[in-house]
Amino acid sequence: MKELLEHIAYCIEYGKINIQSPFPPDMKGKKGADEYTKEALDAGVSPHKVLTEGLMVGMDKVGKKFRENKVFVPQVLMSAKAMNTAMEHLMPFFTSGDITPKGTFIIGTVFGDLHDIGKNLVAMMLKGNGWKVIDLGMDVAADKFLDTLHAHPDAVVGLSALLTTTMSNMQQIVERIREEKPSTLIAVGGAPVTKEFCDKIGADMYAPDPQGLLEELETAC
Amino acid sequence: MSENQETMTGKTRIQMAMRRKKTDRVPWVPFVGVHGGYLVDMPADDYLRDSNAIIAGVDKAIDLYQPDGIPVVFDLQVEAEALGCHLQWAKDNPPAVVSHPLADGIGIADLPELNPGSGRIPVCMEATSILRKKHPDIALYGLITGPFTLALHLAGTNIFMQMMESPDEAHTLMEYCHGISCNMASWYMEAGCDVIAVVDPMTSQIDPASFEMFVAPAVTKLFDMVRDRNKLSSFFVCGFAQQNVPAMAACKPNNVSIDENIPLSFVRETAEEHQISFGGNLKLTSVLSMGSTKEVEMHTLETLEEGGDTGFILAPGCDLVMETPIENLQAVTRVVSDPYHREFVKTLQAAPVIEEVQDLSERWQDDKVIIDVITLDASSCAPCQYMVEAMELASRPYGNKLQCNEFSIKNKEGLRMMKALGVKNVPVTVMDGEILFVSQIPPAREIEKAIQKKLAAKNLL
Ligand code: B12
């Protein structure tokens, strides 16, 4: 059973989705995250264990390698895809309450900004770490963040901006949230964003990468 | 200025540097994109659609920045637009691609055929041919959207997964994008470009193995084609692409250009290994756009020192921010083209910081005019020496009515005087506290005139 969890973590780390998937080339024809997750659940491993000791272990490794420039966007996207496939098997347990998410995270790229690759990676890593993620996409206005926040009052909000020109839009959104729901935890990120900027606009957390965000959330929540 | 400098044109300088041959100085290529619109007071969306505006913008940039080479159009959306991607236009940035036909169910075969009349291609080519005629001595860069960035425009971020899951399809798409690049490159060369610059920022997001598998074959063939036509090529990546720099160099462009995220020394070494030229990596935002002219000068000097004098081309890391202050770019020009000014910046950089401003009120006298020449030091800066000699010569006939001093900024006293007099350059002549001659040594007549005027003001004539 421990072996199954290790297989799951390995498949997530290397982005092996299922037996048909040709990637990575050296695992061609072998079982992937899809099959192993199903086997683990069939063998009676608790869904919580599959998530925390299988999927999350794998995602954590990818996150670290990405931070160290050992893997790049395509590899992370493959890992995320493998994880999503495995998650399908776990979904029923989330709805039944057998697994509870760590929290809800509302994420989006601020209005005026069309860069979403980084934001997507953050969303995937959070999902892979047991968060419920509501992804509002890119070019997102303050109102949309607020509407979603009203529907999920305890959620953490994450804002992404990749242009120096849209960093001011990030500031506007933070101000609006502070006016309407002051207690909300707000995380900000994106290549030009810094810790100083985060403090200046009154956001709560900044991280240079998804792994850093997870660490911040760990201490803040 | 040495004679050598006057005989070598910007274009030759670029051609020699790209072949790692000796040049009289490092060539400089400001990547003017929408900044050209700023120069002619036009928003980016109008500028990039109007060949006359582009010609005027580039003309102005050439006049202001005295570059050795310059791009005609810096917009990585031209090909994508011509192939059916929708653009979202902005006033202060190049447009952005917002729809990806291949992700919306359209096949490669259904994309419109690219020809010299498609989209804004005629605007680009018209601007090129006219600028070619107007500026025969400057290297014109024709900018091509790199095949991987074009693939992202056409297919959206699906391209990343496609490379892993269906590599054959990804190869087909890259092959198609390569064809588009070859067409664009040919049209630009026919219109008169000297250098084909392939700009592929998306490659910063992939690993070397993927780069070698999907990007290298396409761009290598493109660079071969450019070489066969006796033109030069450059491969730019804006963004953190350090992992791919050796693989980029192995594609055999004449030059690799990188941005501020990558240490220039790393690229210099890679370029040396591959015996190609390299360029970069002035900081776009923090220094060129937001820094003071003094910071720009220091940064330019550091970049020049790191780049060295073999095969190096000084350039910003990517296309200039639209509203980059003109004086900042002129500061780059000054440092790169004037060896004395470079020496001046270097001296100041090493000099102790003078905090307090000396009070000079006691210095000025009723019975004489005081001439101060601020120099680097007359022995290592020929113009400084000439200026000092010219002033001494001109003041001789007036005896004690004139007092002529030289202050070298190589010592503290000189630095203090420079600060107190508000001097920002060398050599400079100041008469009774008024800055009169900067850098250029004026003809004797003018010196005479200035002296007479100052003496007359004190009734000493
Ligand atoms: C891909 C890209 C594009 C693609 C975007 C495709 C897409 N679907 O996202 C396209 C081609 C559309 C594009 C368009 C433009 N781009 Co662009 N683009 C890039 C590029 C090459 C990579 C960005 C990227 O995806 N990085 C990879 C991801 C993984 O990194 P990331 O986004 O930083 O995210 C990480 C962290 O920041 C963090 N993070 C991100 N979000 C969040 C959120 C939170 C809460 C936290 C905690 C952390 C976090 O985690 C992520 C993973 O580690 C960069 C240059 C470069 N090489 O970096 C330019 C760049 C960002 N673009 C730039 C520009 C100017 C533009 C355009 C204006 C002009 C143009 N046409 O080129 C348009 C603007 C469109 C718009 N209105 O937004 C400039 C921005 C300059 C500036 N600082 O203002 C850059 C830096 C290029 C340059 N040097 O000029 N671009």
Image (cartoon, rainbow, N blue to C red):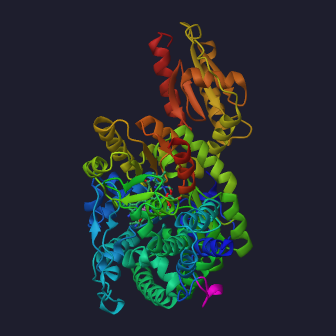
Majority secondary structure of magenta residues:
loop
Residue at the farthest front position: A44
Check the picture and name the quadrant holding the N terminus of chain A.
Answer: bottom right
Q: Nearer the viewer, residue A91 or A32?
A: A91
**Is residue B270 covered in magenta?**
no
Q: Position of residue B42 (x, y in %)?
A: 27, 54
Q: Position of residue B305 (x, y in %)?
A: 69, 52
Q: Nearer the viewer, residue B389 or B65?
A: B65
Can I make out residue A208 in this image?
Answer: no
The quarter holding residue B152 reads: bottom left
Q: Position of residue B405 (x, y in %)?
A: 66, 22
Q: Nearer the viewer, residue B156 or A60?
A: A60
The correct choice, above or below, for B284 with respect to B226 in the image is above
Q: Position of residue B262 (x, y in %)?
A: 62, 59
Q: Is B298 situated left or right of B453 in this image? A: right
Q: Is A137 situated left or right of B259 in this image? A: left
Can I make out residue B363 in this image?
Answer: yes
Q: Quadrant of ligand 1?
A: bottom left
The correct choice, above or below, for B180 with respect to A169 in the image is below
Q: Tell me where the magenta segment starts and ends, as one range.
A: A24-31
